[in-house]
Image (spheres, rainbow, N blue to C red):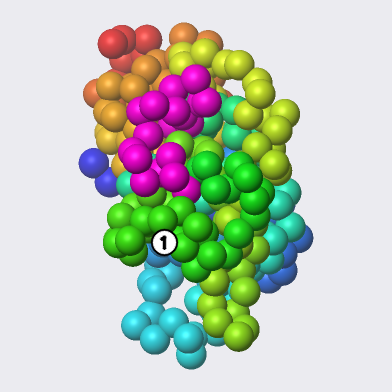
């Protein structure tokens, strides 16, 4: 099932896929992230969902070029990513499926509920991840190379996997990037930037509903499997989130796995499907 043009136009407006809405500075980038709730960093038109890179380009058919260093749009998106990360007003890290993702502050408790590993379940982390976490708890902030050395993980591949694991678990995040004299990230504990959000207790059902809400508000209509692909949720959990919106009266199910906002101004999207059926 392809999206009706009315839905694409809605997404163009909401996801800044229009030239007049293109993101040009760090302040508009932060407003964009807060508006959509969460977005990918540098994905292009080949992947669904909102993206900072696409918003910088200001068009729906934006594709990442082969030579990103010489491309002004990809270069701007990369620089804005660094600035947003540095300012720390929104969450940034590699989350599900290893994708760099921005999350608005209001959604951090819900993402943490779905993917985070609290201290009480730290035993589920790998040995390497525990080693990295132990060092950061002592030092609070460290550059990648220093953290690698201090964690005593001989294989760099295992060390990098540990960094990814801890990011997915909402335990660590990059807080700064330095390019000279050599490129490196500065890592810190997530709780150092978002202590109140990580301390909030929310149910998994509420988390699924709010993540689904954030996506559907910006998408207008979601196709079968789209929410799962964008967020990394399993298909059943994505369905639970969408059905919670139906039960709340926010969304309407118009086909198997297809939901739209109840007040969305598109009459042709649900003409053939009965409302309220499962």
Quadrant showing the N terminus: top left
> Would you say the magenta stretch is mainly helix, strand or loop?
helix
Can residue 201 be seen at all in this image of the molecule? yes
Q: Which residue is drawn at 41% across and 61% down?
A: 43
In the depicted structure, whether residue 124 falls above or below residue 39: above
Residue 209: in magenta span: no
Q: In which quarter of the image is residue 121?
A: top left
Secondary structure at badge 1 equals loop
Q: Quadrant of residue 256?
A: top left
Residue 238 versus residue 13: which sits nearer the camera? Answer: 238
In the depicted structure, whether residue 105 falls above or below residue 25: above
Name the residue tied to disc 1.
43
Q: In this view, does 115 lie to the left or right of 272?
A: right
Q: In this view, does 195 lie to the left or right of 65?
A: right
Residue 203 x/y as whole percent: 52, 13
> Bounds of the magenta span?
114-132
Residue 15 versus residue 160: which sits nearer the camera? Answer: 160
How many numbered badges does the structure rendering display?
1
Can residue 54 be seen at all in this image of the molecule? no
Q: Residue at x 54, y 77 (%)?
A: 183
In the depicted structure, whether residue 67 falls above or below residue 233: below
Q: Residue at x 51, y 26 (%)?
A: 118
Residue 258 x/y as whole percent: 32, 29
Residue 76 x/y as whole percent: 59, 76
Q: In this view, does 144 lie to the left or right of 241?
A: right
Residue 252 x/y as whole percent: 43, 20
Quadrant showing the C terminus: top left
Q: Residues within 10 Å of mark 1 (few under 14, many from 20)?
A: many
Q: Residue at x 37, y 46 (%)?
A: 128
């Amino acid at each position: 099932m392809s999206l009706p043009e009315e839905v694409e136009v809605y997404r163009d407006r909401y996801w800044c896929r229009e030239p007049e809405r293109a993101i040009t500075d760090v302040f508009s980038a932060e407003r964009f992230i807060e508006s959509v709730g969460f977005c990918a960093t540098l994905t292009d038109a080949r992947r669904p969902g909102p993206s900072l890179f696409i918003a910088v380009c200001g068009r729906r058919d934006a594709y990442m070029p082969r030579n990103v260093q010489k491309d002004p749009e990809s270069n701007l998106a990369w620089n804005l990513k660094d600035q947003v990360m540095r300012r720390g007003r929104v969450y940034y890290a590699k989350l599900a499926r290893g994708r760099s993702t921005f999350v608005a502050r209001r959604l951090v408790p819900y993402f943490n509920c779905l993917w985070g590993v609290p201290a009480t379940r730290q035993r589920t982390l790998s040995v390497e991840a525990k080693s990295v976490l132990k060092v950061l708890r002592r030092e609070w902030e460290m550059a990648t190379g220093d953290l690698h050395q201090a964690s005593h993980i001989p294989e760099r591949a295992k060390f990098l996997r540990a960094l990814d694991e801890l990011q997915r678990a909402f335990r660590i995040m990059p807080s700064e990037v330095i390019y000279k004299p050599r490129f490196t990230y500065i890592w810190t504990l997530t709780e150092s930037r978002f202590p109140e959000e990580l301390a909030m207790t929310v149910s998994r059902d509420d988390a699924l509903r709010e993540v689904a809400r954030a996506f559907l508000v910006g998408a207008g209509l979601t196709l079968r499997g789209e929410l799962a692909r964008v967020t990394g949720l399993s298909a059943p959990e994505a369905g639970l989130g969408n059905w919670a919106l139906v039960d709340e009266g926010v969304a309407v199910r118009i086909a198997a796995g297809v939901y739209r906002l109840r007040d969305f101004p598109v009459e042709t999207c649900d003409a053939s499907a009965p409302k309220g059926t499962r």
